Amino acid sequence: MTKYLFKGNFILILFAFLMFIFSCKQDIKIVDINGKKILSIESNIIKTEDGTQLVLEEDSIAKIYYLVRHAEKDTSVKVEPPLNADGLKRATKIADIMRGTRVDVIYSTLTLRTMFTVDSLADIKAMSIKPYENKDLKKLLTDIQQSTDFNRIFIVGHSNTIPSITNTLAGRDIFTKTFDESDYSNFVIVVEKKSGVKDVYTLKY
């Protein structure tokens, strides 16, 4: 009789334990920050304006890519337009967002609108801006991916290049078309993990 009671109690305890484990797994929630407005990045924590926080597991990260299109340009200037007042404010916002996190290198095309977009960021990080040309984009991305010198990379580009850069770095189609000409607000983060998995966060700013 005691033997059967022991077995019965053991089964009940095992069942309760399994239910506990199952309930714990159910409580694990995936934080979705896609489409949210980014407030800041502090070390490995991405914070959005609605209070959401996404903590990136530092030990699992191989590389992080930060990708933006240039800020608002002065459309009254037809050749080599600089940023307008809104664009200069957006450039300052980029610097504020990135102030509390690491950046190893900043890449920009050789246009006034892209260089000015990351000028404030380069200032606060005491870094120079590395120029690139769109015609050499494929080689640049290959070199960046293979580099062991730079693991936190900021790239500013254009409405027709940032979507394709994102897709290349992610290894899949995140964007199926270019950014609208009037849309300057995309802030894309590609996190490449040591396992080879690539997480992509499409934010706004």
Image (tube, rainbow, N blue to C red):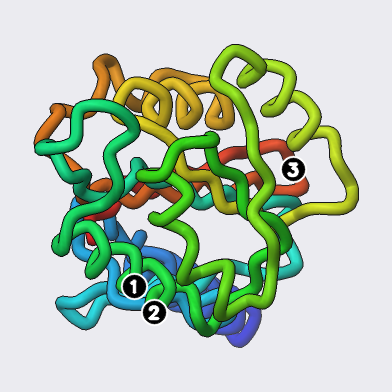
- Please determine whether, in this image, residue 134 is positioned above or below residue 17: above
Q: Tag on residue 96? A: 2
* Contact between labelled residues 1 and 3, with CB atoms less than 8 Å apart: no
Q: Quadrant of residue 54?
A: bottom left
Question: Residue 171: horizontal and vertical position, in percent?
Answer: 56, 22
Q: Nearer the viewer, mark 3 or mark 2?
A: 2
Q: Residues within 10 Å of mark 2 (few under 14, many from 20)?
A: some
C-alpha span from label 3 to label 1: 35 Å
In the picture, measured across the screen, residue 156 lies left or right of residue 149, that is left
Amino acid at pointer 2: Asp
Q: Residue at x 22, y 57 (%)?
A: 87
| Amino acid type of the residue tagged 3 in the rendering | Ser
Q: SS of the residue at dot 1?
A: helix
Camera sees residue 9 = no
Task: Name the residue tied to disc 1.
Answer: 92
Specify the amino acid type for callout 1: Thr
Count numbered badges in the picture: 3
- Circle nearer the N terminus (3, 2): 2
CA distance separating discs 2 and 1:
6 Å
Secondary element type, mark 2 = helix
Q: Which residue is mark 3?
A: 195
In the shown orientation, is residue 96 left or right of residue 178? right
Tell me if mark 1 has few (under 14), some (14-19) or many (20+) residues whose alpha carbon lies within 10 angstroms of its own: some
In 3D space, how far apart are the residues under numbered discs 3 and 2 (Cα atoms)? 31 Å
Looking at this view, is 36 or 76 the one in front?
Answer: 76
